[in-house]
Image: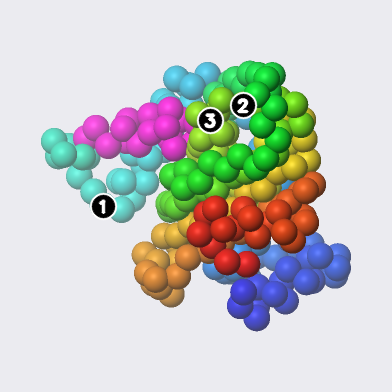
Amino acid sequence: MKQKEILLNTLLKDNKIALSELSADEIGDEHLSTGIETPMRENAFELTDEEKISKIEDHFKSIMEVLGLDLTDDSLKGTPKRVAKMYIKEIFSGLNPENKPKVALFENKYKYNQMLVEKEITFFSNCEHHFVPIFGKAHVAYISNGSVIGLSKLNRIVQYYAKRPQVQERLTMQIANELKKVLMTDDVAVIIDAKHLCVSSRGVQDINSATVTSYYSGKFENEHTKQEFLKYIDMKS
């Protein structure tokens, strides 16, 4: 973490300044997050998906025109509509709670009471600061308290929270909290290992660095259990 980022986060944490008091230039490229919940307006779902697509199409057309692009060109004329549909139906579909995966639990009839790990779940997200991709792997684990979940649902929970503008710390906590809620247990762990194109394709343009975030709760706060999890995903603490 860079010195300026540490200072800003410390000042915010100690309530010496408010994030609203900082300008976009003062924040710059620093990695700031405002809470565990994705910031949403109260009227975020007044418009239908089709109405949102239409509005985004118009706005993105204006952006392309400001950039000087010729939208009469056969290759470009369909781009505003394609981008609008992609935003609503695909890469930001996790903003809509109607797309939240339906999860059913099953009785743990075989009495499996050890750790279950689903590792290397591929995900694609987008940095909320620059709207460029974040991509990587998520590793999740839980210890059953009497119920189990279908394995594919673990992937779907990761994908749902990834498909919205994100910061990696928030994504990690949102996945973990959802798992705790649906599994009705605190015995949950999440690790995310990801690359950020806001770092590799712009700014410092560092193509080699990656960011790792983690969340441990319940039995996973025990060092032995944590090390067992890290061993399964081939990582060291």
Q: Looking at the picture, how far across and down is residue 72, in whole percent?
A: 17, 37
Q: Which of marks 1 and 2 is nearer the N terminus?
A: 1
Callout 2 amino acid: Ile
* Disc 1/disc 2 C-alpha distance (Å): 51 Å
Q: Which residue in the structure is indicated by mark 2?
A: 149
Q: Main secondary structure of the magenta part?
A: helix
Callout 3 amino acid: Leu
Can residue 192 be seen here?
no
Marks 3/2 in contact by CB < 8 Å: the verdict is yes
Magenta segment, which residues?
Answer: 77-93
* Disc 3/disc 2 C-alpha distance (Å): 6 Å
Q: In this view, does 229 lie above or below 201?
A: above
Q: Which residue in the structure is indicated by mark 3?
A: 151
In the image, 79 versus 33, the foreground residue is: 33
Residue 68 is tagged as: 1
Point 52% across, 54% down: residue: 233
User: Would residue 66 appear left or right of 233 to someone viewing this image?
Assistant: left
Point 71% across, 71% down: residue: 8
